[in-house]
Every structure is written in structure tokens, then in C-alpha cells.
Image (tube, rainbow, N blue to C red):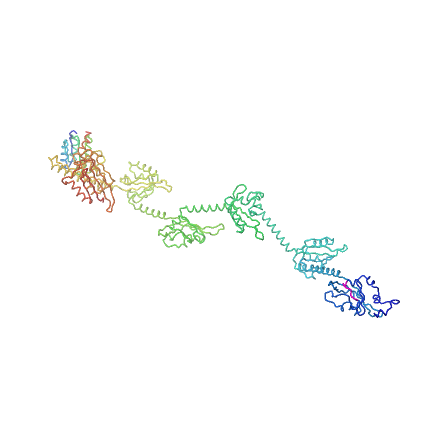
């Protein structure tokens, strides 16, 4: 305090330090702001109340004194501790230099801190020595806070500007780019130096657009998502949206801040989406196929024009319907079931052909393709139904199928063997006639022909792959005029003519072939038959002539030449009447009439004229000749010379008669002899019996000669035996099948029945009025061949007694007959009537 | 039946004899017996008979001519033949036939057949 003592308070000019130290305490307090003063050693000597307030304490000015600063603790602005000896005051004291606007942080004893802006000025005395220093400081914590806030905000802004995902640039009033952020540069691909400092118009693709933008901005207008196109460094065009406003200062345009949003991708996808949507919408409406959307219940949500047209309903009508409403009732169940499966996700989609009833009531066929639209979670949103009217196709299909079926039926029904193959020759179809002809059912994989084996007409083996069908397929041409022989598995052979014909599709491609096999066995047989017939006609001894319906001779064989004496050349073309004797002309007319009516005239005997005028006996057969339609066009005549035969027949008859005459005369002579021998014994029954036996024998002979010794009918034989006895016919009942007896059997039976008859007439059934005779016979087969079983029974005659002695009759019946017949006989003299049975072989 | 005078045309004498006996037994008489055609024709033309029995075959010759003569004269006749009933010319199919050998009963039946027309 010596300094203070050096300077008198009055009367001399006080130094600043002295003035401050000596000033009344109120002076310092009056200073707005915190102030404190240190002496030349730095000891705190004065401070005002505001300083004490900022410090949060009142440092002592006496011992212990404080040096350089009255604060509790000091920190640098960055927060590091600042010892009081290092504080700005201490520095200012040491250096003697004033400190301007230094910042320190003061911590109060309560821990709160303030930032203080410090201004220190060293105080010098008159001699320039440092007497002390004064520190004016103020609490700038608030400003600091604001400043910090500003700094942080500006940093955020900067960060925002630089690191924004959106392109940002600032353009000056003259259009020069002042700044551009990373996003902007990246968007366009420029380096900062290539972009910043250039005119913005250089980077716009559309000059009018940027002109407009700048114009509007200069007038203070705001741009909000203004579409523009910018040119990137690589030449590509970027679609951007510019949001911008202008900074005006004092009504003057300073610059613009532009946000550039890259919407190229969006634009492109939007464009694409719009395009596809437009396309879809156009397609949807213009499609000739019906398209509809339906909800889960099948209710129609949207339909296109074609859909309406196909169903004959208006859109309004359809939108009030489900697709089942117009579905034909028979097809509803299937469509409904499938749709339910599709809605539930069991199936993704389905296709179905169904019938639908149109608004006008007609039924149409649709092919429906149904699929679903689902949201991203897979939930069903709506069903898309695409309809194709296939009525025409269906009808065509049906017609085609029907036609094909008809064709198959037709082919099946054809009597000719028909089969088809594919282009490789594999058999694809064959009808029943083919199976019949082949004698087998073709197997899967069979090629070329339905037959089992093939031969050429000359009999050599014909491999299937060389058959006409194979040729037709290989050379793609119909094959005609071939002949082949098919052998069946059973060895029989069928000659046939094949008609293989290649088949082509619309484009002319070979798709297969059809073959018809004409069985010509009949024709072959007919040909052979005709040949044989011709040779028979040619070589026949019979005259075979044909004539037309008018009786004009057409053919004339060798036999005719021999019989009638005309050569073929001289008689063919002449009327057949040339052969008729004048008295038989009418016969010709009768024959012609009968032939014209289609009658066949069995062989009859007549007479004709030879060329030399002589007559010949002929047997003639005449048959009508018909054309293929069955009309009579003429007649064939077969004439045989019967002159010789007739002569022979007459001769034979004569001889038989002569022989008979002799035999009978001989028998009659024997009869006469007997008569003469027994003359005078007129009542002798023996003579009568003899006579009748002789007659019976003769009758049997007579029968046989009459039938040319071929056999006698049993009924007739019985009549001949019974007739001479003059029995009333009703008393003899003979029954049995017609039967021709061999001569020996006939003779033996004749004799036997004669004996039985005479016996019956003498002793048996014919002696009474009521007595009857029953004769029955039958023929039985057996191991020994056919046998005759015959039975003679007398009924209602007198009581029979067995004869006391076996006479000729009995012996003849019992022994001779059995011997002659080689059979068995049984004669029984039963009291009620004689019974006689015969069993004899017929041959 | 009344007594008939019968012409017998028969070349076998034993048979002619038999026929004669039969006729006699039946109460008729034989007017003549002819054994040859010429003779038979002669008798047939001139003789007086009620009926005739004619053997169709006279030693190999047909005796139809005799029948024709008799028919002309209205004399009924019977054929006696060894041919059997079918050995006759169909022209005479109406004529009663006795097939040799025959018994008296047959002769009687035949005579009664023709004598009704006598």
C-alpha cells in the first residue's frame, strides 16, 4: 500500500489504479458489469457486488488474500481446469498486455458454472510501471448457450444440407449454382467443380422449363414439386421434382434454394404402370374373350363388354348376378365346387368347359379359365374368370366326333375288310370284316396289314413290309391293280385285291393310310367254276344251247352239233324253231312263255328235227337265263338224245313182261295140273289151300317184278295178300310207317301173311262177323342195324285152340320164315286170338 | 248170275283147261278156246259169246287186236295176264285184269264186273 501512500489523494493527479483503489465502494458498484482490481502482485484488492454475484462468493480482501481472481474455480471454455495463476488476469499482469474478450468458465462454490467474457487492462503508473490491473467480466452464459445453439443448428443444417438424401442446390439470382450437396451431385453424377459455379440452365434438359422456373422464382413464387428433366453427366435424363423458394432481401432476389427430388425411377415405373394399366384396360374392354371379376361368392364385380355380349345380358344385369346364375344347371355343381376350392386356396386356378344359358334362353358352351387375385398376405381378393365361347368349336367338335363315329360305324358296317394305319404303318383301326378275313384280331404294334401271312398270286411269300399298303405309305401314292393272298392262322387262304390309299392332313402331310381288302375268293371260285362249266359244256355229250328271249340261238356246243347235225356257225343267230317238227310248233310258244315268267322246265321228253329232217326223241331241260338284275334275257336248253334209252327201256319192259308171262303161265300150269290131279275131289280143302298158296306166291312175284325187283311197299304187299280173300277192308287194320321191303323179305312175308290170313279165314277171327285183325309194325334201330318189328293179332274171334298137329302153315311160319328172314318169329295160339310176331333185319 | 258163254283166248292148253274147269264150276260154259291170234280173231269176229277171257300174250304176240274186235262187237272181256296189272297197254286201263295164276273166286269177281254190262 506504499503506492497509495506515494500519491496524495488531493492536489495531484491520481493514477488509474490509485483512482480505482481509492474510489468509494459505491463507485465500483455503479459500473454496469462485474469488475475487480488486482494490485501489481495480483492480489485481489477491490471488486464490486456484481462480480461477487457472478462468482457466487465474496472473497476476502484481507488475509488470506486471493490472487488474480475471486472465483471459486476456473475452467477453460473447453472444460479443462484453469489454475488461477494461469488465468487471463495472471497473464495480463505478467505480460502487461490487455486481454480482450477472453472467455473463461467460472464455477461457483455451489457447482453452477457460468461463462464469462473477460476484458483486462493492466493499470500503469506514471512511469509506466504496472500498478495493477482491472478485470471487467460479464456473464455470457446465455449468449454462449444461444451461440452454441446456433452453432449446433447451423451444423445440423449443414449436415442436413450435405447429407440429405434429397438433392439440394442454391442458385444465385443470375442463375449460377452456388452450392450443391452430395445427393444432388450424385444424382447427376458431377463432381462439385463440374457443377458448382455453372449456370443451372446448362443442366436442364428443357430450356423453357428452367426459364419458367427461374422466372417464377425471381418473382418470389414458390415451386412445389415442379417437374423438370435434368441432364446427368452420363447423358441420361433424370426426372426430378423441384421444390424451391427464393431468398429475397429487401425485396431483392438473392438466390434460390432448390430441393431436387429424383423421380426418374418412380416416373419410369409410374409410366410403365400407367402404360400397362392403360393397355390392360384397353385389352380388358376390347378383348373378344369375356373377362369378369368375381368375389368369393361368385358375385360378379366387373365384367367387360365381350362378357356381356357373350351372355346376352347388360352389365347392370350381370353385376347383380353370380356366375352360377347363368351356368347351366347340370354344370353348376362342378363349377361351384372348383371355385370354392380356388377361393380356399386348395387350387390356384382351374379350367372348365360348361354350358351357360344366355339372356335369350339359348345355351352356349364356354371354356372358363378361373384364377385368383390375392393380396400380399395371400388372402383371396377376387377371382378372375376368362370366358371363351366355344359353342361353335364344341358343335364342330361334336359334329366332327359324330362324323368320325358315323364314319367308324360305316366302316364297321361295310362288308369289305377295312383298316387304317398311321404314317408309320401301325394299324390304328380295323373293322369286323377285316378280322373275319384275316382270321385273327390284329395285335397292338402290328404293321402294314391285318392279315397273318401274305402271298403273291403266284404263291410266293410276300413279307408284310413289301405289301401294297407298305408301298402306298412309303411312296405316298394309292396302289391299285395288285392282288395278294392272305393266309389265316388256320391255314385257309383268301385271295384279295387291296386298295391302299394314303391319307393326308390339311397341310398335305402324310398321316396314314386306309386300305380296303376285297375278298375275291368268290370271284376266283366263280372264275374257276365258269371255266369248269365252260369245259363241261364244251365236252358234254348233251346238246347245250342258249337262246335269247326271242328264241334266237346264241350258243351251240359240240353235243348240239352231234345231236342235231348243225355246225355252230350255221345255226347261231337262227331261230330255235328250226329244230321243231311242224306239229310241235306250239310247244315252242309254251316254253318261251314259261321261261319269260322265270319258270324252270324240268326235263321232259319230246321230239325235235335234225338238220337232215329226221326226228329224234330227246329229253329237254330248259332254264331261264337272267342278267345281273335278275331279268330273264334268254334260256338255256339241255337236250339229250333219248332214242336209245327209250328203245332200251322198251326192250327191258318187254323182257320183264315175257319173263313174267312165262313164270305165271308156269304157275298157272302147275295150278291146272293140281286141279286135274285132284279132279273129282272138288270139295278137297287141300286143293284149295294149295291153289291159294300158289296164288299168293305169284302175287308176291308180281309185286316184285312190278317194282323192278327193287323192293315192295309193306302196305301194298298186305293188300295183295288180303285182296284174294275178299275180306271187308274194315276188318283188317294195318298200321305202321311206310317201308320198302327187300325182295327176299317181301316174298317171305307175303307167304307168311297168306298163311295167317287163310288160317284166320278158316279158324280164326275172320270166321266170325265181329272178328278183326290188327297188323302193326315199326322199325327200330339197334346195334345190329335196322330191324322190322311186326305183330299180327286176331281180335274178337272164336276161342283159339292150339292145333293138335303142326301143319304146313305153322311150320312155314315158325321155321321156314325164321330161317329165311334170319330173324325171330313167335306164333302164339292164345285163346283170345292168334298172335304172331316177327323181328327181322331189314337189310 | 246167269250162265255165260265165254270165249277163252289162251295158248297154254293146261291153263285153258283150268279156266274152263273154273268157268264150269261157276256154272258158265266155254263157247270156244282159241290159242292163236288168227284163230282168236276169226272166232272173235264171228263167234257168239257173252264175254271173253283173253291172255294178253299169245306165244309172244300181243292179243290186243282180239280185244279190239270184241270191243267193236260190244263183247265185254277180261284180260288174263302174267305181266301183272301194270304190264298192260295204258289204252286198256279200264279193262278188268286177272293176274295169273288166279283162283275161281277172282274169276267170279271179274266176270261179275263185266257181266253187268252184258
Is A680 displayed left or right of B113 in the figure? left
The residue at the point 61 percent across, 52 percent down is A273
The image quarter in which residue A582 lies = top left
Is A346 in front, or is A406? A346
Q: Is residue B63 visible?
A: no
Q: Residue at point 41% right, 46% down? A: A414
Dominant secondary structure, magenta: loop
* A543 versus B27 height, above or below: below
Say if the magenta span includes residue A707: no
Q: Which residues are magenta?
A: A54-60
| A758 versus A502 height, above or below | above
Q: Residue at x 35, y 51 (%)?
A: A492
Locate residue B48, reporting x and y percent.
16, 30
Q: Residue furthest front?
A: A63
Taking the magenta stretch, the answer to whether it contains residue A57 is yes
In the image, is B52 to the left or to the right of A737? left
In front of the other: A599 or A380: A380
Left or right: A362 as drawn, with respect to A798? right
Q: Picture quarter containing residue A64?
A: bottom right
Q: Position of residue A585 (x, y in %)?
A: 30, 36
- Residue B47 picture quarter: top left
Query: Which of the image's four quarters has the N terminus of chain A?
Result: bottom right
Amino acid at each position: 500500500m506504499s503506492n497509495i501512500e506515494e500519491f496524495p489523494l488531493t492536489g495531484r493527479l491520481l493514477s488509474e489504479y490509485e483512482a480505482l483503489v481509492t474510489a468509494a465502494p459505491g463507485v465500483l458498484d455503479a459500473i454496469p458489469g462485474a469488475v475487480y482490481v488486482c494490485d501489481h502482485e495480483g492480489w485481489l484488492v477491490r471488486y464490486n457486488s456484481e462480480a461477487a454475484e457472478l462468482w457466487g462468493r465474496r472473497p476476502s480482501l484481507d488475509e488470506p488474500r486471493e490472487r488474480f481472481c475471486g472465483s471459486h474455480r476456473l475452467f477453460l471454455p473447453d472444460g479443462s481446469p484453469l489454475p488461477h495463476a494461469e488465468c487471463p488476469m495472471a497473464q495480463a499482469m505478467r505480460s502487461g498486455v490487455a486481454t480482450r474478450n477472453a472467455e473463461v468458465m467460472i464455477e461457483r462454490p455451489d457447482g453452477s458454472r457460468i461463462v464469462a467474457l473477460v476484458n483486462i487492462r493492466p493499470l500503469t503508473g506514471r512511469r509506466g510501471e504496472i500498478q495493477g490491473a482491472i478485470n471487467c467480466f460479464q456473464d455470457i452464459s446465455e449468449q454462449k448457450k444461444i451461440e452454441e445453439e446456433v452453432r449446433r443448428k447451423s451444423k445440423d443444417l449443414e449436415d442436413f444440407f450435405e447429407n440429405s438424401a434429397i438433392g439440394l442446390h442454391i442458385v444465385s439470382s443470375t442463375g449460377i449454382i452456388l452450392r450443391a450437396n452430395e445427393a444432388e451431385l450424385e444424382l447427376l453424377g458431377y463432381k462439385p467443380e463440374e457443377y458448382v459455379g455453372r449456370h443451372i440452365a446448362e443442366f436442364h434438359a428443357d430450356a423453357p422449363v428452367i426459364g419458367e422456373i427461374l422466372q417464377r422464382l425471381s418473382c418470389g413464387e414458390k415451386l412445389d414439386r415442379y417437374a423438370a428433366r435434368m441432364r446427368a453427366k452420363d447423358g441420361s435424363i433424370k426426372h426430378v421434382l423441384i421444390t424451391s423458394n427464393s431468398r429475397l432481401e429487401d425485396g431483392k432476389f438473392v438466390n434460390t434454394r432448390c430441393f431436387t427430388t429424383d423421380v426418374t425411377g418412380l416416373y419410369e415405373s409410374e409410366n410403365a404402370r400407367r402404360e400397362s394399366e392403360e393397355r390392360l384396360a384397353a385389352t380388358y374392354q376390347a378383348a373378344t374373350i369375356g373377362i369378369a371379376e368375381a368375389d368369393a361368392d361368385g358375385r360378379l364385380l366387373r365384367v367387360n363388354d365381350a362378357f356381356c355380349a357373350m351372355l346376352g345380358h347388360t352389365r347392370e344385369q350381370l353385376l347383380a348376378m353370380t356366375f352360377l346364375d347363368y351356368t347351366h344347371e347340370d354344370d353348376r355343381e362342378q363349377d361351384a365346387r372348383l371355385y370354392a376350392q380356388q377361393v380356399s386356396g386348395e387350387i390356384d386356378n382351374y379350367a372348365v368347359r360348361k354350358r351357360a344359358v344366355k339372356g335369350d334362353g339359348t345355351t352356349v358352351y364356354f371354356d372358363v379359365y378361373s384364377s385368383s387375385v390375392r393380396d400380399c398376405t395371400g388372402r383371396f381378393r377376387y377371382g378372375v374368370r376368362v370366358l371363351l365361347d366355344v359353342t361353335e368349336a364344341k358343335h364342330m367338335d361334336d359334329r366332327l366326333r359324330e362324323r368320325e363315329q358315323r364314319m367308324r360305324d360305316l366302316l364297321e358296317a361295310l362288308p369289305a375288310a377295312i383298316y387304317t394305319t398311321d404314317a408309320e404303318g401301325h394299324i390304328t383301326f380295323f373293322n369286323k370284316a377285316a378280322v373275319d378275313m384275316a382270321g385273327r384280331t390284329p395285335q397292338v404294334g402290328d404293321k402294314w396289314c391285318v392279315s397273318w401271312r401274305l402271298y403273291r398270286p403266284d404263291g410266293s411269300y410276300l413279307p408284310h413290309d413289301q405289301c401294297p399298303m407298305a408301298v402306298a405309305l412309303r411312296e405316298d401314292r394309292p396302289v391299285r391293280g395288285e392282288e395278294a393272298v392272305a393266309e389265316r392262322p388256320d391255314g385257309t387262304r383268301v385271295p384279295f385285291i387291296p386298295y391302299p390309299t394314303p391319307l393326308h392332313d390339311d397341310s398335305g402331310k402324310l398321316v396314314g393310310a386306309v386300305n380296303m381288302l376285297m375278298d375275291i375268293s368268290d370271284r376266283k371260285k366263280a372264275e374257276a367254276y365258269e371255266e369248269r362249266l365252260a369245259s363241261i359244256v364244251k365236252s358234254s355229250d348233251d346238246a347245250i344251247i342258249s337262246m335269247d328271249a326271242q328264241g334266237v340261238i346264241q350258243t351251240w356246243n359240240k353235243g348240239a352239233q352231234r345231236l342235231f347235225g348243225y355246225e355252230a356257225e350255221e345255226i347261231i343267230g337262227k331261230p330255235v324253231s328250226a329244230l321243231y317238227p311242224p306239229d310241235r310248233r306250239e310247244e315252242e310258244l309254251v316254253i318261251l312263255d314259261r321261261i319269260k315268267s322265270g319258270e324252270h322246265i324240268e326235263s321232259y321228253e319230246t321230239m325235235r328235227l335234225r338238220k337232215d329232217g329226221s326226228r329224234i326223241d330227246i329229253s329237254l331241260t330248259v332254264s331261264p337265263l337272267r342278267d345281273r338284275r335278275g331279268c330273264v334275257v334268254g334260256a338255256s336248253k339241255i337236250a339229250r338224245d333219248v332214242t336209245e334209252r327209250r328203245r332200251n327201256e322198251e326192250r327191258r319192259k318187254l323182257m320183264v313182261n315175257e319173263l313174267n308171262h312165262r313164270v305165271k303161265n308156269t304157275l298157272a300150269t302147275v295150278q291146272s295140273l293140281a286141279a286135274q290131279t285132284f279132279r273129282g275131289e272138288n270139295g278137297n280143302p287141300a286143293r284149295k289151300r294149295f291153289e291159294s298158296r300158289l296164288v299168293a306166291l305169284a302175287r308176291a312175284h308180281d309185286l316184285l317184278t312190278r317194282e323192278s325187283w327193287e323192293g315192295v311197299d309193306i302196305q301194298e304187299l298186305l293188300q295183295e295178300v288180303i285182296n284174294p280173300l275178299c275180306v271187308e277192308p274194315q276188318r283188317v287194320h294195318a298200321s305202321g310207317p311206310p317201308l320198302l321191303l327187300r325182295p327176299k323179305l317181301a316174298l317171305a312175308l307175303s307167304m307168311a301173311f297168306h298163311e295167317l290170313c287163310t288160317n284166320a279165314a278158316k279158324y280164326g277171327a275172320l270166321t266170325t262177323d265181329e272178328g278183326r285183325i290188327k297188323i302193326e309194325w315199326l322199325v327200330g334201330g339197334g346195334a345190329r342195324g335196322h330191324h322190322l318189328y311186326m305183330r299180327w293179332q286176331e281180335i274178337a274171334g272164336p276161342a283159339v285152340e292150339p292145333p293138335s298137329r303142326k301143319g304146313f302153315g305153322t311150320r312155314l311160319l315158325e321155321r321156314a320164315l325164321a330161317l329165311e328172314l334170319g330173324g325171330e318169329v313167335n306164333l302164339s295160339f292164345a285163346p283170345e286170338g292168334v298172335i304172331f310176331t316177327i323181328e327181322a333185319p331189314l337189310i | 248170275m246167269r250162265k255165260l258163254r265165254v270165249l277163252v283166248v289162251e295158248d297154254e292148253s293146261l291153263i285153258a283147261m283150268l279156266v274152263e274147269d273154273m268157268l264150269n264150276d261157276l256154272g258158265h260154259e266155254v263157247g270156244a278156246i282159241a290159242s292163236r291170234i288168227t284163230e282168236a280173231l276169226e272166232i272173235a269176229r264171228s263167234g257168239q259169246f257173252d264175254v271173253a277171257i283173253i291172255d294178253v300174250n299169245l306165244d309172244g304176240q300181243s292179243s290186243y287186236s282180239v280185244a279190239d274186235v270184241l270191243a267193236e262187237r260190244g263183247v265185254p272181256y277180261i284180260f288174263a295176264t302174267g305181266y301183272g296189272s301194270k304190264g298192260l297197254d295204258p289204252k286198256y286201263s279200264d279193262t278188268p285184269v286177272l293176274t295169273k295164276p288166279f283162283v275161281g273166286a277172282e274169276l267170279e269177281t271179274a266176270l261179275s264186273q263185266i257181266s253187268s254190262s252184258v
